[in-house]
Amino acid sequence: MDSLPPLIASLARVLDLPGTAVAIVDGERTDLSLVFANHGFGRLLGRPDAPPAGTPLRHLAAPDGDTDLPAMMARVLRHGAAMTDTVECHRRDGSRLWTEMTVSPVENHDGHRYLICMQRDADGARRSGLALAVFDNTHDGIIVTDADKIIIDTNPAFTRLTGYTRGEALGHKPQLLSSGKHDAVFYQALFATIAEQGYWSGDIWNTRKDGSQLIVNATISAVRDNDGRLLNYVSVFRDITQQRLNQARLERMAIYDPLTGLYNREHFIATLETHLVSLQYTESGIAVLFMDLDDFKPINDGFGHAAGDELLVEISRRLKRLMRSTDIVARFGGDEFVIALTGMGNGDKAVKVAQKIVDDLVQPFQLDNGESVGISVSIGVAFTNDYRLGTATLIDSADQAMYDAKLSGKNRIARAQRFVESRSQDTFQRVRQAFETGELELYYQPIVDLASDRTLYFEALARWRHPQEGVLAPHHFIDVIMHSSLSLPFGGWLVQEASRMAKRLQDHGYLVGVSINLSQDQIETGSFLRAISESREALRLSTPYLTIEVLESSQFHDLDLACSQLLEAKQLGTSVSLDDFGAGISSITYASQLPIDTLKIDHSAINGIDTRASQRQFVGGIINMAHAMQRKVLAEGVERQAQLDELRRCRCDLAQGFLLGEPMPADELTRRYLDPTARPDYPLQRRPAVRA
């Protein structure tokens, strides 16, 4: 300090206060070197003592910081006024520190200029500001309570998620949101966990201000001071209500028949298998009752499907009332019901139970429309006390006995005299082997745009290249896949194979996609979405590349859920088509409520378009309706030129059928469409040229 000019030395002595970081810079030097720095300045930067004189001040600032120190110093000297800014410095150990620096100009009596730099730690203030910004802007709800669990603060997201304003919540306990679904033991365990490890994470069922349920995933943490004293609880939570409801829907769909609430086929078989295994530890047996309604179709046809559904629900109620809690009651589909009677000593007892069912079900049913209807029922009974017997054999034997009962007349019961050796398991194993070893492959049938006469995309159709029997059509294996554990993996395989073909077409410069058929369970479970996302990313596919065809005959358990899954698929770059339109009763509902881009008219409607005026009017009506709904129309099953001509006159958009191209394997598609010498009748649509 002795080497400093008297005025500057006096200032240094005055400003060198405990806890204050002071440095003096020579304003006449371009490197802004220090002429003085006190111990507080050194401590601020993590040094045991002050930096030596001559050290350039810029060496103490972070090289990639936001503040340009030389420019800041130049402005202070130019304007002759003090300036304050936040500067990022680096400590001696390499760590970074935000400081608030005030720079003031001082001129010695000889005109030499100096800069007085005073700094203080701004990290705490910066972190506080950042924390406040996060608190106010995060999409997660935040509740802060005191040590007595009284709410002292909430963030804006809390109000958005719960409906309660900050003012309404302050002074209350979080029980304000309680749904009553968690008891005192739950909360005692929750706070015991916080006391032990400092936080708790999990799901809580709450209630919004409007009474609706709010399921949240929350993390509740304890905040303590340096002495370990509890100061606050902080809860950060996010809304997972829709996610949990979707999960609950899927779990219910996996177990129950959506119409009747009885077990479905898959769950019945799994439960029956468990009971069969347990027979080795008991002295009792199991009986399976396979039941079919004899007079259901006339009721369905005469009074409508709604009345038929009402009757099935009422039959289910009667069955549940008749059965014990240990019995298993399921609906296999249509008007077939199957019951497993556990703890049966012999088959005769099972026949008595079957008779009890017949006596109850023959009593008239009163429908909501005021009509009184009666039904008859045929029941087949199969009994076993052998744990080694397979579920398929037991069910098939009861099924065969049911047909024997039908042959005897109405309201009859027949008992299986021998077990029918089931071939279903062997068939499943063979189909699974074919799937796992690559014997299944896709054939591709072109779909042509009638305005340009170009092929816009191909429909992918599964085939089984059997080692002994040659190429097999879908009816040899598709039902086995769709009603087994292979369904979801098969859907993923379809997406992957179709995406690879779309990539091949795009790599050749064509804007041509591939369509695939997905089943109800593949769509509702959403299992195909991950395959679409992964294929699109891995192959770098351009939109459009994939079309999902929804069968009109699909019986969605939850139409809203199916709509949500298809919308998500469209966000991933796919389009959606409704297949077999006009062949069933759900067409209009699906066309209006699902996110459909294209209606695919069933081949049965196209068949007579060139020979019958009524059929032309029918198809024309579908096309006009679809265009009014902003949907395109695809006619499938076009086999004659006259059919194609009529479709053009009806302003149909797209066509598919043997006349335009038969299904072909991938290598033949390559030869017919991608080979340089190929001259197809309906060329592929090329990708538009990119302008420079």
Image (cartoon, grey):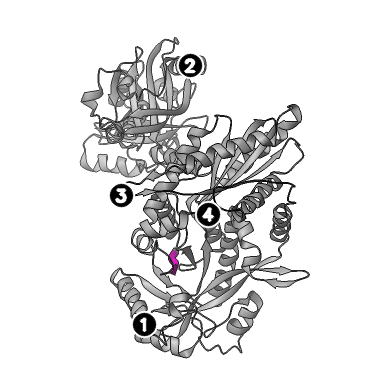
Mark 1 vs mark 3, foreground winner is 3
Quadrant of the image occupied by residue 60: top left
Above or below — where is 290 with respect to 195?
below
Residue underneath mark 4: 522
Specify the segment rendered in magenta. 575-582
Above or below — where is 18 with respect to 570?
above
Mark 1 vs mark 2, foreground winner is 1
Q: Which mark is residue 189?
A: 2
Residue 578 lies in the magenta-colored region: yes
The one nearer the camera, 477 or 222, is 477
Q: In which quadrant will I find the C terminus?
A: bottom left
Residue underneath mark 3: 369
Residue 73 lies in the magenta-colored region: no
Q: Which mark is residue 616?
A: 1
- At which x and y percent is residue 387? 75, 36
Q: In which quadrant will I find the N terminus?
A: top left
Q: CA distance from mark 1 to mark 3?
A: 37 Å
Which amino acid, by three-letter code, is at mark 4?
Answer: Gln
Q: CA distance from mark 2 to mark 3?
A: 53 Å
Which amino acid, by three-letter code, is at mark 2?
Answer: Ala
